[in-house]
Each structure stands twice: as C-alpha cells, then as structure tokens.
Amino acid sequence: MEALKGVRILDMTHVQAGPTCSQLLAWMGADVIKFEPPQGDATRGQLRDVPNADSLYFTMLNCNKRSIVVNMKTAEGKSVFVDLLQKCDIVMENFGPGVLDRLGFTWEKIHQINPRVVMGSIKGFGSSGPYADFKAYENVAQAMGGGMSTTGVPDGPPFVAGAQIGDSGTGLHLAVGLLAALNQRNRTGKGQFVEVAMMDGVMNLCRVKFRDHQRLTRQALSEYSVPTRQGMGDVPRAGNDSGGGQLGNAIHCKPHGPNDWLYVVVQEAVWDALAKRIGPDLGLPELAADPRFAKIADRRKNQNEMWALITKFAANYTKREFMAILNPLDVPCGPIMGTEDLANDEHVRGRDMWVEIDHPQRGKWWNVGMPIKLSDSPAVVKRSPLLGEHTDEVLKEVLGYDDAKIASLRTAGAFSAPPKKAA
C-alpha cells in the first residue's frame, strides 16, 4: 500500500516551492488535486522547449497529480472550492500576500468550513514581521536567508547556489510540517495552519554558518582557508572549504575542463596514507612527516600549501582516476558531476533517480526521481496532468456531481475564463 493512500490534498500552489512539496506527497500516494485557474499554472508555458506542450518546468514538478480548472472569480467557482475543501485533508497555497484573503478565504474561514483540514502556506517572509508584504523569489530568499553572503570566494561577489534552496528547499520544509500537522489532526480531530517562509527555510539550511557566526565571537575559525579573527562579525565566503572540522576542497584534474574536479576531504586519520602515496611522485618522499602538515593544526594553518601539492599530483589524472587512487586509502572524495554526468550515471539510473516518462504532448522526457525510498511503498513516477484533464473526473468522483450539475456550472463560467469584452 502507498504510504499516504487515502490522504487527499487540494493543491492551489504554483511555480516551484509548493509543487515541490505536493509532488513528493503525491509520490508517496496522496491524491493531489492540482487546483488551477483557467489559464493554468504559469510554468506550463514558461521556458517552453516543445511548441504547444507543457514546459519541462511544469512537468518536472507536477507528476502524479490530477488537474482541475476552476475560476475562483465566479460565485460558482467558489462553491466548487468550498465543496472540495470539505472533502480534503490538506489544502495548500503559495499565492502572494493577501490573495486568498481577498477572495474571501482566510484561514479562519477555511477552518470554519472544514475544522479538520490542515492548511499549508508558503510565503516569502511569512505572515508577520516588517517583511511580510514583500514579494520573494528564489534568489531573493537565498540573499535574505544567509545563503548568498556565505557562498563564493572571499574577494568576489556573493553567489546563488545552483540547488534551489529557496523554492524547493521551502517545499521540503512544508512537507514535513504538513505531515506533522496531519498526524496531530488524526489524534485530535482538529486541523491547523502550517506556514513556511522561504527566508526561514534558507536560514535553516545555513545553520552551520550560524554555528560559525557564534564561534567567531570567541575565536578565529582555524579550519577556514581564508583569514578569520575573533569578533570579525560576518562569516566570510571561503570558496570550496568543507565547512566542517575536517579540511576539504575541490581539486582540478586533467583535462582541466569546467567539471574536471574531484572534491577531497583530508581527514586526520587519512593524512599519513595520503601523504605516503602522493609524496614520492612529488619528489617529497617524507611528506607524511613534513612539519608543515604532520598534525591537523599544522595542516589547517598551512592548508593552501597542502592543497597546492595535492593539485600538482592530481594534474596527471582524470577525476575518476584520482578517485580510484584515493578510495583504497579511505579518503572521502567525489567527482564534481555535471548534469550530463548525472543523466548518464549507472548509480543514478540504478536508484531510479533519473526516470523516463511519456507525455501525450511532448513525448518522452526525463525527470528526477523520488529521493525518499520507502521499502514497503516505493514511488511510481507518473506524468504530469494536462490542464484541466481531470476536472469532470474529480467533480464526479470526489464531489458526486452529476452531468447536469457539471453542465450548469460550466455554462455559468465556473471552469473557464470569462469571455473578453468587445473593444
């Protein structure tokens, strides 16, 4: 049995943060009803690569869902929304501040309609505080949550992370909150409001930087490759430093292309074996005993020299060849894998993390698979829905509407945009 079988979710979210959350829940077996306006989720048409087909932006975030189109600007559309609220366990939204309230559906109203429903809400900065009315975006959340200030090289500009920690990271946080609230609802019979702010989610993902921020009030950070001092304030950008107690960095390998790098962590326990392996090739047979590197405190102090020696050794090897040298020495390491690497990687394919799906509009395409592996209920990734594909199905199956009622609502404009007025 699917883990969330029997859980029904009314998903009013769009773009990335909310759909990330609802797709994960759908992969775990929830019946996710994607509740769309007549024009559909904006990402259906954004970055389109196949004419007249839903974009990859949409298809990769909305698998395993059913789509219903409802015009919430009509009284009839609002009545359908109310009926669905009464049949769902969770309702989710990530509209701009105040949008749902202006439609007449505050949390208090929704809770009154269905006291058992759990409501999930994603906002850029939450519903309280001086930033509450600001609009957010992936990179804005990274900027304001601490991600950008700590990413990059010391003398360069701050960088955004390639991983979508603002949007998708927030969606992951919301999934945890919704499941916790649902578990409590099943005990108490009462739903609750679950809110995740994008800025808050980014801060949580930057917790080790806030660890270092507090350490800086007492000491320099000896594991950093850049100079630090007690009381300096902001945690500095430190390139590819490991960020932990052990030293780590990316080492450039041949043929020295943009992704020909191996990330290497020099743990205290592996230095002796590593130094004895690379030292002779560097003309330094006594490298393991070199006083610059003999103890971890010495390696921290002189780590830039250590990395230079390791890089000189690696120049004769590809990232995979260098990895093959280090693995028998128990040196933690991993190649910098580009999207092309990952899309063709045996390990990735074997774990169903790159799966092929067929779509009626765009044909065959690939999606990232389910990262959460449940032994008794493995996820089966299914294609995303066409706009409004399941409108009649949901109205009949979930709400019990007959053909006559559906036809009447359709005539009243409950499922379509109003006709444009003549100029």
Image (cartoon, rainbow, N blue to C red):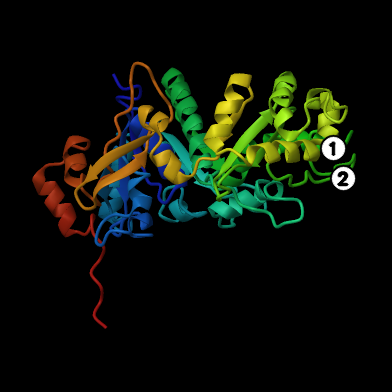
- Residue 231 point in image, percent of width and height: 89, 42
Quadrant containing the C terminus in the rendered view: bottom left
Residue 110, visible in the rendered structure: no
* Image point (79%, 27%), residue name: 287
Tell me: 73 left or right of 328.
Answer: left
Tag on residue 390?
Answer: none
Tell me: 370 left or right of 381.
Answer: right
Label 2: few (<14), some or many (≥20) within 10 Å? few
Inspect the image, locate mark 1, and give the three-letter code of the amino acid beneath it. Leu
- Residue 198 point in image, percent of width and height: 57, 45
* Image point (49%, 25%), residue name: 180
Work out whether residue 419 or residue 144 is closer to the camera in this orientation and state it.
Answer: 144
In the rendered image, the vertical position of residue 375 relative to residue 200, given as above or below: above
- Residue 21 point in image, percent of width and height: 43, 38
Work out whether residue 83 or residue 183 is closer to the camera in this orientation and state it.
Answer: 183
| Mark 1 vs 2, N-terminal side | 1
Tag on residue 232?
Answer: 2
The image quadrant of residue 415 is bottom left
Residue on which disc 1 sits: 216
Q: Residue furthest left?
A: 404
Work out whether residue 364 or residue 38 is closer to the camera in this orientation and state it.
Answer: 364
Asked if the residues shown at circle 1 and circle 2 are in contact, with their CB atoms under 8 angstroms apart, the answer is yes
- Residue 158 point in image, percent of width and height: 68, 54
Which element is circle 2 on?
loop
Inspect the image, locate mark 2, and give the three-letter code of the amino acid beneath it. Met
Which element is circle 1 on?
loop
* Image point (42%, 48%), residue name: 105
In the rendered image, the vertical position of residue 369 relative to residue 254, given as above or below: above
Label 1: few (<14), some or many (≥20) within 10 Å? some
